[in-house]
Amino acid sequence: MENRIIKVQDGLKHSDEAAIILSDINRLYFSGFKSSAGLALITKSCAYLIVDFRYGEAAKAQVKHMNVEVYQNLLRTLRELFKKHGVRKVYFENNGVTLKQANTYRDMLKDCEVTPVFDTYLDAIIDNLRIIKSDDEIQKIEQAQKITEEAYLEILNYIKPGAVERDIALELEYLMRKKGAETVAFDLITITGKNTSRPHGVPGDRVVRDGDFFTMDIGARFEGYNSDMTRTVAVGHVSDEQRSIYETVLRSQKTALQKIKSGVAAEKIDSIARDIITSAGFGDCFGHATGHGVGLEIHELPTVSVKNKTLLSAGMVITCEPGIYISDKFGVRIEDMVLVTPHGYKNFTTVPKELIIL
């Protein structure tokens, strides 16, 4: 984490500049400390985690690479630190900061005779750091995926005619927490029948029926880091149409995966997956990006989409998740989460993706 702070310090152009990090996720990224309030102040020569009384004791015990300041009056604390380090200009994040926060800090810094900058300059520095995962981050993501898969393999026993979508989601969350997840990575998608035609369908009271597809888009969070996986299974039996569409999505997903490696443009991976689905006559039924980055947030850079020319680099963690969704009928999505390597990829997702009929 010290290297992350140094990268921000290197991005400060002059000795009288500093960065203030307000968003919960980025504050966690730089401090390693989870809290619902506070800020990180990074100057050319020093870094501070500034929190109120609620977090003071825990932060001082946990954070060793930043100075922890517990404030009673935030304006006074900032004024003192700005004076100590000769700060005259402060960069703020543009992403993840509310208009209310921006206005509050504009007024506060005016009292300190410091110029606030709300643009994308600091975001670019942070994004370039977060898009490449460290070994420690990779290990946590991999563990989150292991927990997800263990829960998935158990939940297959619950998916049968008469089971309710919402109950399966609750059981999955219970299993993930029992196996070591701090929470789920997002609101789990466990949908059946016609609901599977909705890419982000919400589990409700729909009952599983014989002949249904059942889609699970699921993930766990482990020590702040997320996993993401989708599997579509069948219940009882499938029609020829269901099997054909499943095999098309599977071929699309496998083909795109094989092209993932450092130096390949994200848009190329998307087009490979999309071209197969389009050639099968279902281009209009695949309306989302082929993938996205995963880390502290479930959706991070890079987006694996038709418009993103970003070159994949070793250390990126991305998903590959093409799908076909036939309105008011059924849908299929298959999603793996992989680590980009210099010569290919490492697939964190190890559970089978060939069609399972329960």
Image (cartoon, grey):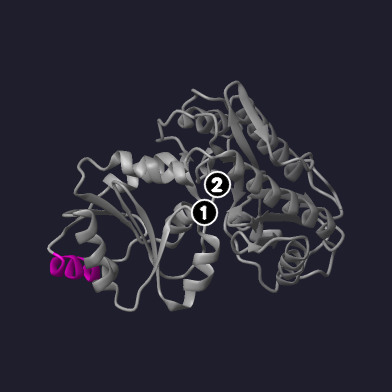
| Residue at disc 1, secondary structure | loop
Give x and y (percent) for residue 342.
57, 23
What mark, if any, has residue 297 been given in the picture?
1
Q: Is 101 located above or below residue 86 in the figure? A: below
Most common SS among magenta residues: helix
**What residue did someone put label 2 on?**
294
Q: Is 296 located above or below residue 286 in the figure? A: below
Q: Quadrant of residue 103?
A: bottom left
Q: Residue furthest top?
A: 343
Q: Residue at x 76, y 50 (%)?
A: 149
Does residue 321 show up?
no
**Magenta-colored stretch includes residue 166:** no
The answer to whether the residues at label 2 and label 1 have Cβ atoms under 8 Å apart is yes
Give x and y (percent) for residue 257.
63, 30
The alpha-carbon separation of the residues under discs 2 and 1 comes to: 6 Å
Label 1 CA crowd tier, 10 Å (few <14, some 14–19, many 20+): some
Of the pair 171 and 55, the residue shown nearer to us: 55
**Magenta-colored stretch includes residue 108:** yes
Task: Tell me the kind of residue under disc 2.
Answer: Val
Label 2 CA crowd tier, 10 Å (few <14, some 14–19, many 20+): many
Which span of residues is magenta-colored?
A: 103-112
Give x and y (percent) for residue 307.
40, 35
Task: Tell me the kind of residue under disc 1.
Answer: Glu
Of the pair 253 and 195, the residue shown nearer to us: 253
Give x and y (percent) for residue 346.
67, 32
| Residue at disc 2, secondary structure | loop
Q: Residue furthest front?
A: 84
Q: Residue at x 38, y 40 (%)?
A: 7
Taking the image as shown, residue 245 lies to the left or right of residue 124, namely right
Does residue 234 show up?
yes
The image shows a total of numbered marks equal to: 2
Q: Quadrant of residue 200?
A: bottom right
